[in-house]
Image: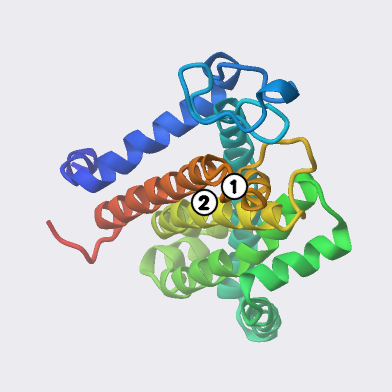
């Protein structure tokens, strides 16, 4: 039933297909790429798109198509792992806050509110300034930024679920707090969490590109889409393809995740009827 409803949503199917293509491109990057993305060839610098170089070359003669393909692996890896960090921390904090309430709830939610009060890019830049540039620190920064969204979402679900009759029955039969939280409550929170994870994944890719554009992401010569855009802006009038193709890759990846996330919401949200 759920799968049939999903495939009837043409935009969601389009997003899923596009996401699968991007994922396949990232996984099979060594076979998809037409050249070594790190190989310098000064004689071929700033070559326009052609049959030899599908997306042209950059200022060092590196094949831009190959660099965009390898950049997909970076974007998807950073986006996926940062959302895993945010989901793990957010789910734990949301479960504790919603179940125990009281002063624990107040402390956790005030911390989450404080994090949410900062603009995403400024908070991420601040964390990166403390931790330093690099893949691991970038994932931690984005994970911290998105943790409050999952924590508040799970908390709101727990506040409703904890009053259900089957939770009272579990308490009466002697189930401990951990069993109630992870066996009886958490499985009923997954639908909104999955929807939030899908949409947040797309925005995490966008912010990874933004931080890399500012020099806080993958260090050179890693072909992050954001760093490719930063290189292209310096020669925009001379070699516009250096900006067009990485920008299109970012736009398509975010679009695919948003469309797929909207489709999942329509399928998993019980308030939306056929």
Specify whether 195 is left or right of 46. left
For label 1, count other residues whose C-alpha is less than 10 Å away and answer few (under 14), some (14-19) or many (20+): many
Q: Residue at x 67, y 52 (%)?
A: 234
C-alpha gap between disc 2 and disc 1: 6 Å
Q: If you read the primary sequence from the N terminus, does the residue marked by circle 2 or circle 1 appear first?
A: 1
Element class at badge 2? helix
Residue at 57 percent of width and 22 percent of height: 29
Q: In terms of image quadrants, where is residue 224?
A: top right
Residue 159 visible, this orientation: yes
Is residue 96 among the parts visible in the rendering?
no
Q: For this rendering, which residue is in front, 49 or 6?
A: 49
204 or 101, nearer to the observer: 204
Which is nearer the eye, 37 or 16? Answer: 37
Q: Is residue 35 above or below residue 97?
A: above
Question: Which residue has dot 1 on it?
Answer: 79
Q: Would you say the residues marked 2 and 1 are in contact, meaning their CB atoms lie under 8 Å apart?
A: yes
- Report the residue at 29% width, 60% height from top: 269
Residue found farthest to the left? 274
Q: Which residue is mark 2?
A: 201
Q: Secondary structure at mark 1?
A: helix
Q: What is the quadrant of the N terminus in the image?
A: top left
Image height check: is 32 above or below 105?
above
Q: Position of residue 68 (x, y in %)?
A: 57, 34
Tag of residue 135: none
> Where on the picture, by quarter, is residue 6?
top left
Instruction: State the scheme by which the image is colored.
Output: rainbow
Query: How far across and down, in percent of the image, does residue 274 sit?
Result: 12, 56
**Left of 15 or right of it: where is 212?**
right
Mark 2 burial class by Cα count in 10 Å: few <14, some 14-19, many 20+: many
């Amino acid at each position: 039933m759920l799968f049939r409803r999903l495939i009837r949503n043409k935009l969601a199917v389009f997003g899923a297909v596009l996401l699968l293509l991007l994922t396949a491109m990232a996984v099979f990057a060594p076979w998809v790429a037409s050249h070594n993305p790190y190989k310098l060839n000064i004689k071929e610098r700033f070559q326009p798109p052609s049959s030899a170089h599908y997306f042209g070359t950059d200022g060092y003669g590196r094949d831009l198509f190959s660099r965009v393909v390898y950049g997909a692996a970076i974007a998807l890896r950073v986006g996926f792992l940062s959302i895993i960090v945010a989901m793990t921390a957010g789910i734990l904090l949301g479960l504790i806050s919603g179940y125990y309430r009281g002063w624990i709830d107040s402390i956790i939610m005030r911390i989450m509110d404080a994090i949410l009060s900062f603009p995403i890019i400024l908070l991420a830049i601040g964390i990166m300034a403390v931790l330093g540039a690099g893949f691991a620190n970038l994932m931690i920064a984005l994970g911290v930024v998105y943790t409050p969204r999952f924590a508040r979402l799970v908390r709101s679900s727990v506040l409703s679920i904890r009053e259900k009759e089957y939770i009272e029955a579990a308490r009466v039969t002697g189930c401990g707090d951990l069993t109630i939280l992870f066996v009886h409550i958490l499985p009923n929170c997954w639908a909104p969490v999955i929807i939030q994870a899908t949409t947040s994944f797309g925005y995490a890719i966008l912010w990874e590109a933004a931080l890399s554009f500012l020099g806080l992401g993958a260090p050179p010569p890693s072909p992050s889409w954001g760093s490719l855009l930063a290189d292209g802006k310096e020669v925009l009038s001379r070699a516009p393809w250096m900006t067009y193709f990485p920008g299109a890759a970012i736009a398509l990846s975010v679009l695919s995740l948003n469309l797929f996330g909207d489709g999942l919401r329509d399928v998993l949200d019980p308030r939306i009827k056929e």
